[in-house]
């Protein structure tokens, strides 16, 4: 009987030998693209699970309501102290926001750090209308009704525009 | 190069795309804008020496008037209104009032109740009393009668004294004595009138008899030293009075008994109409519009109506025309679940100690590891994504021991009351409770001797966690309501210049405050830098 097995083995061997070179090389796992995608995925997972940070914003520190005397008020004239204060009818306003009116060299600078009541009532920028520092506070008793109205107008405007930060009282003797 | 793109690459691409798009699709919107939590109150730009800056609600910043009243539109003007207007608006908005009796629900006709106000008002007006102004003590559980008695006092200008039910006879006796109440409303056969001997002012008693016992005549007691009358007798046979046109708003509408921490004794505190309506209207606008009371809401006071905070919230709900469901069984004397289970409320008020207890039991009941995992997942949803977990089959799978308050619950009001010494609830406990109850929680600071309603309360979507140190360092009670302004005055070592933020004694002023000008409460607190009040040691 002829050898029937042998040709079959030969055939099989041929097929196997022929197929072997066809197998592609192993799929590359660590290609640059895969690494980039992997790190992106890892970053996204980290972002999802990282602890939340609760932000805080500190509110601006409130200004302490202070009692001023003509002498302690004087230094708040914009030159010695950047805060510009002025007093109207015994109430001290912080007019720093209106630096273009009350700052150094500005038109109303003579009122900065002073009791501006009489000057505003008379509508005049005159040093002689400011109460001297060593005299008691101006009582404004001698103003005419029109002047009082005008002063009240100024007071209301200041109240609407600027912060009330204190009161002006006489020097304690 | 083309051989580089393999199934690994495709898998990674899918993972990255998933990580980017899944959150966009499934995370959803937070309950409220997180940025609004950074500064929750309006802080005055100036402060006095030895005091912190005045903090106010952001609805009514410095320079604007505080909320004064209901603002009822009348022609072209608005008026402040009084307690009577709450009932009028409730009727106008066709609100409903139901009572839960065991498993049954009684739907009251509002017109009948409105008629009962007049018959009761007429009956009480006709009673002989020694005092010029009639003082009506109401010792009733949460019920339609309790609410009606309150409004009768408003319409007919009597002084209303709510007394918590149930209480020991000595407590009731003491309260009657302190307030000189001459008229008492109480359930039939719940108290022996001989136990109230020390309350010598008491002259008339109106008995509320439940429907099943009305065949018995409770009013027929020959030995009684007071006149007895049954509520249903007045309601059915009584003559209807006409409501006085005007009421004397300078007189107190309601008398509250509360402990003053500074004096360390019980005080009778008068609440005027303005106190109450300003507290109610501030409460009505305190929440963002989507969380406010709506007509569809079902409100249940799961706390005694004698508690002023509960009553103020109930009035707020009535003002919005909600369905009010009252149940005589409420915490602290009854279980929370029984108070709510048949009402299926969407908004409730709970006493603080009851909520603390719910926290304690439900957290301890999470014994399996998956309970904890699920809880951590829900807390994460709350804290990280700003959303209260919803009720679902999946969430309910985590069925450890927690009260079942119905599927509609969306908001819980709870108030710390230093005057009664309630246990403080920390912000982390509140977060746990939100996850356990699937509901938003508003935590308020009340001090009944000082002000009607709440003084401050947390923002409804504030789920920020904190450090639970021994001092409850990060825990807070939120920002002021629009009817009060709050500042801290230096007290002993607590000063406004403290490095941790201004500290001191809570001092309040405004239309909800029980006296003119400022009221120093004696409660020590601290302002956090987000404008929330953190309560410190008591007294």
Image: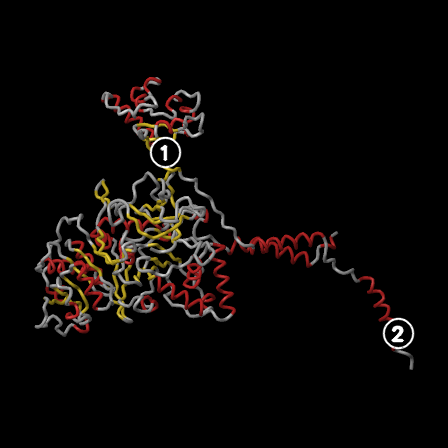
Quadrant in the rendering for residue B311 = bottom left
Picture residue at 48% right of the left edge, 64% below the top? B375
**Dot 2 crowding, Cα within 10 Å, few <14, some 14–19, many 20+:** few
Left/right of residue B174 with respect to residue B41 in the rendered view? left
Q: What colour-coding does the image apply?
A: secondary structure
Residue B401 position within the rendered picture, expressed as x and y whole percent measured from the top left: 42, 70
Q: Above or below — where is A100 with respect to B169? A: above
Residue corresponding to mark 2: A7
Which residue lies most toward the right here?
A2
Quadrant in the rendering for residue B210 = bottom left
- Residue B459 appears in the rendering: no
The tally of labels here is: 2
Residue in the foreground of this view, choosing between A44 and B49? B49
Q: Earlier in the sequence, mark 1 or mark 2?
A: 2
The image quadrant where one finds the C terminus of chain B is: bottom left
Residue in the foreground of this view, choosing between B515 and B405? B515
Left/right of residue B532 with respect to residue B257 in the rendered view? right
**Dot 1 crowding, Cα within 10 Å, few <14, some 14–19, many 20+:** some
Q: Which chain is disc 1 placed on? A: A
Residue in the foreground of this view, choosing between B356 and A70? A70
Q: Which chain is disc 2 placed on? A: A
- Please state which of the two labelled residues, at mark 1 or mark 2, is closer to the viewer: 1
Query: Which disc, if any, is residue B447?
Result: none
Residue B286 position within the rendered picture, expressed as x and y whole percent measured from the top left: 34, 50
Quadrant in the rendering for residue B306 = bottom left
Residue corresponding to mark 1: A163
Residue B489 position within the rendered picture, expressed as x and y whole percent measured from the top left: 35, 46
Picture residue at 11% right of the left edge, 56% below the top? B131
Which residue lies most toward the bottom here?
A1
Picture residue at 50% right of the left edge, 58% below the top? B380
């Amino acid at each position: 009987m002829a050898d029937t097995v042998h040709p079959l083995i030969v055939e099989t061997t041929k097929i196997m030998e022929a197929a072997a070179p066809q197998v592609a090389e192993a799929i590359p796992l660590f290609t640059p693209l895969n690494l980039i995608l992997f790190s992106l995925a890892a970053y996204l997972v980290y972002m999802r699970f990282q602890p939340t940070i609760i932000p805080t914003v500190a509110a601006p520190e409130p200004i302490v309501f202070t009692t001023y005397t003509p002498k302690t008020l004087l230094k708040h004239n914009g030159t010695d102290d950047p805060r510009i204060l002025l007093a109207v009818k015994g109430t001290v306003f912080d007019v720093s926001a209106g630096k273009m009116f009350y700052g150094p060299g500005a038109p109303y600078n003579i009122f900065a750090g002073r009791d501006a009541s009489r000057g505003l009532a008379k509508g005049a920028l005159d040093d002689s209308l400011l109460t001297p520092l060593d005299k008691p506070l101006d009582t404004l008793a001698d103003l005419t009704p029109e002047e009082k109205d005008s002063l009240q107008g100024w007071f209301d405007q200041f109240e609407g525009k600027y912060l009330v930060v204190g009161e002006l009282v006489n020097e304690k003797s | 190069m083309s051989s580089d793109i393999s199934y690994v690459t495709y898998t990674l691409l899918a993972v990255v795309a998933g990580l980017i798009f899944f959150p966009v699709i499934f995370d959803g919107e937070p309950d409220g804008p997180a940025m609004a939590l950074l500064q929750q109150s309006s802080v005055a730009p100036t402060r006095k020496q030895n005091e912190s800056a005045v903090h106010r609600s952001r609805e009514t910043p410095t320079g604007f008037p505080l909320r004064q009243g209901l603002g009822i539109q009348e022609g072209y003007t608005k008026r402040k209104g009084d307690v009577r207007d709450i009932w009028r608006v409730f009727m106008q908005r066709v609100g409903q009032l139901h009572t839960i009796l065991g498993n049954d629900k009684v739907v009251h006709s509002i017109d009948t109740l409105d008629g009962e106000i007049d018959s009761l008002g007429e009956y009480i007006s006709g009673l002989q009393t020694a005092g010029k102004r009639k003082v009506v003590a109401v010792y009733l559980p949460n019920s339609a009668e309790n609410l009606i008695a309150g409004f009768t006092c408003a319409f007919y200008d009597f002084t209303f004294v709510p007394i918590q039910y149930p209480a020991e006879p000595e407590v009731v006796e003491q309260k009657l004595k302190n307030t000189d109440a001459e008229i008492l409303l109480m359930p039939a056969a719940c108290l022996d009138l001989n136990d109230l001997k020390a309350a010598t002012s008491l002259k008339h008693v109106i008995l509320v008899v439940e429907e099943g016992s009305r065949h018995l005549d409770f009013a027929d007691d020959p030995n009684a030293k007071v006149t007895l009358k049954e509520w249903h007798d007045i309601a059915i046979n009584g003559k209807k009075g006409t409501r006085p046109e005007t009421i004397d708003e300078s007189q107190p509408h309601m008398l509250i008994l509360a402990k003053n921490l500074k004096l360390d004794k019980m005080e009778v505190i008068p609440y005027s109409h303005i106190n109450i309506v300003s507290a109610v209207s501030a409460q009505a606008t305190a929440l963002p519009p989507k969380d406010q009371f709506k007509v569809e809401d079902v409100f249940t006071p799961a706390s005694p109506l004698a508690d002023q905070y509960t009553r103020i919230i109930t009035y707020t709900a009535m003002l919005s025309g909600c369905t009010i469901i009252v149940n005589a069984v409420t915490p602290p004397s009854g279980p929370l679940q029984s108070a709510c289970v048949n009402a299926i409320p969407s908004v409730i008020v709970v006493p603080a100690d009851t909520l603390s207890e719910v926290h304690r039991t439900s957290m301890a009941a999470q014994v399996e590891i998956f309970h904890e995992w699920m809880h951590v997942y829900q807390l994460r949803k709350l804290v990280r994504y700003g959303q209260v977990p919803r009720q679902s089959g999946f969430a309910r799978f985590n069925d450890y021991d927690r009260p079942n308050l119905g599927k509609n619950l969306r908001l819980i009001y709870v108030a710390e009351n230093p005057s009664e010494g309630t246990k403080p609830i920390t912000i982390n406990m509140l977060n746990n409770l939100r996850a356990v109850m699937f509901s938003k929680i508003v935590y308020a600071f009340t001090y009944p001797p000082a002000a009607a309603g709440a003084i401050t309360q947390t923002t409804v979507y504030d789920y920020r966690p904190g450090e639970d140190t021994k001092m409850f360092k990060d825990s807070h009670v939120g920002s002021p309501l629009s009817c009060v302004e709050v500042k801290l005055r230096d007290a002993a070592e607590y000063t406004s210049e403290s490095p941790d933020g201004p500290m001191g004694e809570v001092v309040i002023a405004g239309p909800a405050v029980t006296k003119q000008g400022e009221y120093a409460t004696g409660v020590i607190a601290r302002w956090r830098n987000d404008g929330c009040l953190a309560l410190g040691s008591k007294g």
